[in-house]
Image: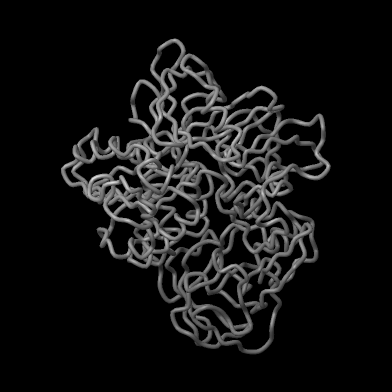
Amino acid sequence: MGRLVSVNVGMPADVPWRGRTVHTGVYKRPVTGPRMVRRLNIDGDGQGDLGGHGGEERAVLVYQLDSYAFWKRRLGRGDLDPGGFGENLTVEGLADDQVCVGDRYRIGDALFEVTQPRVTCYRVGLRLGEPRMAALLVAHRRPGFYMRVLREGEIEAGQEIAKVASGPERMTIEEIDGVLYLPGHTREQVERALRIPALSPGWQGSMRALLEAADGADPAGSTGAVGLSEAAASPAPGWPGFRPLTVTAVRAESRRVRSLYLSAPDGTALPAAAPGQFLTVRLTPAGAGVPLIRSYSLSGEPGADAYRISVKREPHGSASAWLHDTVRVGDTLDTAAPRGSFRLVPGSDPVVLMSAGVGVTPVMAMLHALADERSPRPVWWLHGAHDSTEHPFAEEARSLLRDLPDAHATVFYSRPTATDRAGTDYDEAGRLSAERIRDLSLPDGADVYICGPAAFMSEASEALGEAGLAAGKVHTETFGSGASLTPGVTRPGAGRAPHPPEGMPQDGTQVSFARSGLSVRWGAAQGSLLELAEACDVPVRWSCRTGVCHTCELGLLAGAVDYDPEPVEPPAEGNVLICCSTPSEPVVLDL
């Protein structure tokens, strides 16, 4: 039997933080008298970031007096009062090592069901003035937990908490939190978690990712981070840093796209690349000052003797111009190993390969892979181009599609020329638009891979969602910087192009942001690599800022880093957590 010590509520507010503004509901305060608990929250309460908090599965957050006592001792704090950890219910009893996912509790007139541990988030640290707090909650196994409301009703401080049902599998909050965030979980634990109907959909998705990663591997060797980040699930790179590869062939694919074939100088085999991955090259044009670092999708047959990258000449692209005008057969390019989480997923479901312009390059590699194995999967090839002069791989794609037993292709020309032949060069005049995507009756359950301009990918993804395809089956690849994820934060520089930071040191350690095409110098005053990226207005993704959630995990293409604090679980081989790292030598980031 437990006891409800305090009911705490608070509406979202804008809070100043590090020169920015955070919209957050973490500031909860105790209230007296009865309060109505509803399906989404308690009367008078709200959440500022509904992506990470709130909703039916996370309607009420619970934290315990015992944990308050622990943190008072651990942090030497005498100012920790109910609501201080952002919880709605401060309770006596209901410890994280005793409460199980799926347990049901009655408080007053309301009935609750436990759904998941607390989400690791920087905002509890903001509330307490302790930036490390998200990591400490996980490391010391005291996260607290969320509950859904099964029956609405009034509750009040002082009431008893009666347990009315036990969750299946008897998996405690402490245990399941460790499965996801800490090393050393087992396959058996993951399978148990997936047998709990009450577990929230987000955590079920993370557990499925862990299970997929464990297939065919030693379960004890899998890492929790695989369930947190796509980057963590990426294969280890084939070699560290950059190595020279020789240009063995050059071929024009369209009016503005040129392919380069790259092989090992000594003729040895190159590590296999997964269809959809990219190469990063370091270029040194005369007069460039600093090397130009760019990433290009692999477009050729996976497992071939040479890597093929296909480069579009951009109007003001110094790197693409140099690759088009200067590089010849026999030249060498410094090249990082194939990378990327945009990869063709094995399976039996239908496949939709959708692209616009030079976005065809990674899906072209996927088409090669499917044709090489004569895949029985239904394959839909959808591509949009201006006209035949801007249509790379046109005949190559047609040939590969003929090798597939169940292939469907529709090519769209937005501005066909007078000599372009309908039914031969293209199928439809006009754009590959959201309206056309909705009209195509694409197969239910298909795995969809989209690459092209950002607006095209956004429009296509939205159209596919409206057509009923699950978001988890739609995969997109971005050539440049990806979308930011800065939960609750209003970023002053949002929308600005990446740029050197103010007061950049002249003799600091060089940091290159490969996707952003920016190289700058880092100095100790600039803090972590995440803080440097923010100062440069490079789009970033993060949540905890203390090395727990792995939201910021990305490829470390070259160099080495130091960590402070040490992450709760290290990133995958060849990756880095930028939220808690600084460069110990020049680094190149896939950012």
Q: How many numbered discs sit on the rendered protein?
A: 0
Q: Residue furthest front?
A: 418
Residue at image position (65%, 31%) is 587
Image spot of residue 43 (x, y percent): 60, 85
- Left or right placement of residue 277 versus residue 327 in this view: left
Image spot of residue 574 (x, y percent): 54, 32
Res 369 seen here:
no
Vertical order, 293 against 516 (above or below): above
Residue at image position (82%, 41%) is 525
- Left or right placement of residue 268 versus residue 538 in this view: left
Q: Residue furthest top?
A: 266
Q: Quadrant of residue 293?
A: top right
Q: Residue furthest left?
A: 405
- Residue placed most toward the observer, 394 or 517: 394
Q: Quadrant of residue 90?
A: bottom right
- Residue placed most toward the observer, 92 or 225: 225
- Residue placed most toward the observer, 121 or 406: 406
Image spot of residue 85 (x, y percent): 67, 66
Image spot of residue 82 (x, y percent): 70, 72
Vertical order, 251 against 119 (above or below): above
Quarter in which the C terminus is drawn: top right
Q: What's the image's color scheme?
A: one colour
- Left or right placement of residue 327 versus residue 290 in this view: left
Res 384 seen here:
yes
Vertical order, 241 against 530 (above or below): above
Residue at image position (33%, 52%) is 412
